[in-house]
Image (cartoon, rainbow, N blue to C red):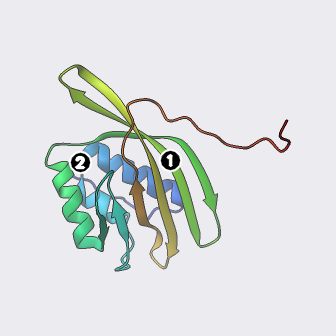
């Protein structure tokens, strides 16, 4: 059954948690509640076109949810927060059913949030094509080359 948040998310982490909860439940109303009202919001699904605006984003997620909820979980979240904006670099783990049984895939995702008069809202969800093995991270280059 679709649910709605009781109160506006108070920080970008809450927005992100609600976004992934909506994906896991296949709840389009909950998912759309995290997006900003700005007409320039954007979403890119793995390997797909850039969708601009709430109507295009809603249609894309309705198509995704027509196959049921998405078993997706944010892993390895890196955060850059300022007083009015936040960028989360996320490795998503997606569980899918294939002819060989349950399989995992990983995608590298960027989620961007802004603080609005209505609270924190998502303005961008950009996901790269999935990989069949867990994504490796390179977090820092050595300062001295030998």
Q: Give the residue at the far top of this rendering.
A: 100
Quarter in which the C terminus is drawn = top right
Determine contact: label 2, label 1, CB under 8 Å: no
Q: Would residue 43 appear left or right of 77 to someone viewing this image?
A: left
Disc 1 on helix, strand or loop? strand
x and y percentages locating residue 94 in the rendered image: 35, 37
Q: Nearer the viewer, residue 43 or 23?
A: 43
Q: Tell me the crowding category of disc 2: few under 14, some 14 to 19, or many 20 or more residues within 10 angstroms, Cα based.
A: many
Label at residue 53: none
| Quadrant of residue 48 within the rendered picture | bottom left
Q: Is residue 118 above or below residue 101?
A: below
Residue 52, by quadrant, is: bottom left
Residue appearing at x 38%, y 63% in the figure: 34
How many numbered discs, if any?
2
Residue named by callout 1 = 90
Residue 43 appears in the rendering = yes
Residue in the picture at 22% in, 72% down? 55
Left or right position of 37 against 134: left
**Is label 2 in a helix, a strand or a loop?**
loop
- In the displayed structure, 143 sits above or below 56; it is above
Q: Position of residue 77 (x, y in %)?
A: 55, 45
The residue carrying mark 2 is 26
Q: Earlier in the sequence, mark 2 or mark 1?
A: 2
**Residue 9 to residue 17: above or below:** below
Q: Which residue is drawn at the image coordinates 65% and 67% (left, top)?
A: 82
Mark toward the viewer: 2 or 1: 1
Residue for point 59% across, 49% down? 78
Q: Residue reaching furthest left?
A: 66
Rendered location of residue 56, percent (x, y): 23, 69
| Residue 86 horizontal side relative to residue 140, left or right | left
Q: Give the distance between the C-alpha atoms of the residues marked 2 and 1, in whole angstroms.
A: 20 Å
**Can you say whether 31 is above or below 54 in the image?**
above
């Amino acid at each position: 059954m679709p649910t709605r948040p009781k109160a506006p998310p108070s920080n970008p982490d809450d927005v992100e948690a609600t976004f992934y909860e909506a994906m896991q439940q296949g709840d389009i109303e909950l998912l759309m509640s995290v997006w900003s009202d700005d007409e320039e919001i954007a979403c890119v699904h793995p390997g797909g076109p850039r969708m601009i605006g709430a109507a295009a984003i809603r249609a894309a997620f309705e198509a995704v949810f027509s196959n049921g909820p998405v078993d997706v979980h944010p892993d390895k979240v890196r955060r850059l927060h300022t007083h009015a904006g936040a960028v989360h670099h996320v490795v998503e783990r997606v569980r899918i059913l294939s002819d060989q049984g349950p399989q995992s895939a990983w995608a590298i995702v960027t989620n961007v949030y802004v603080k609005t008069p209505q609270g924190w809202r998502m303005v961008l969800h950009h996901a790269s094509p999935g990989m069949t093995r867990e994504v490796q991270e390179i977090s820092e280059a050595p300062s001295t080359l030998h």
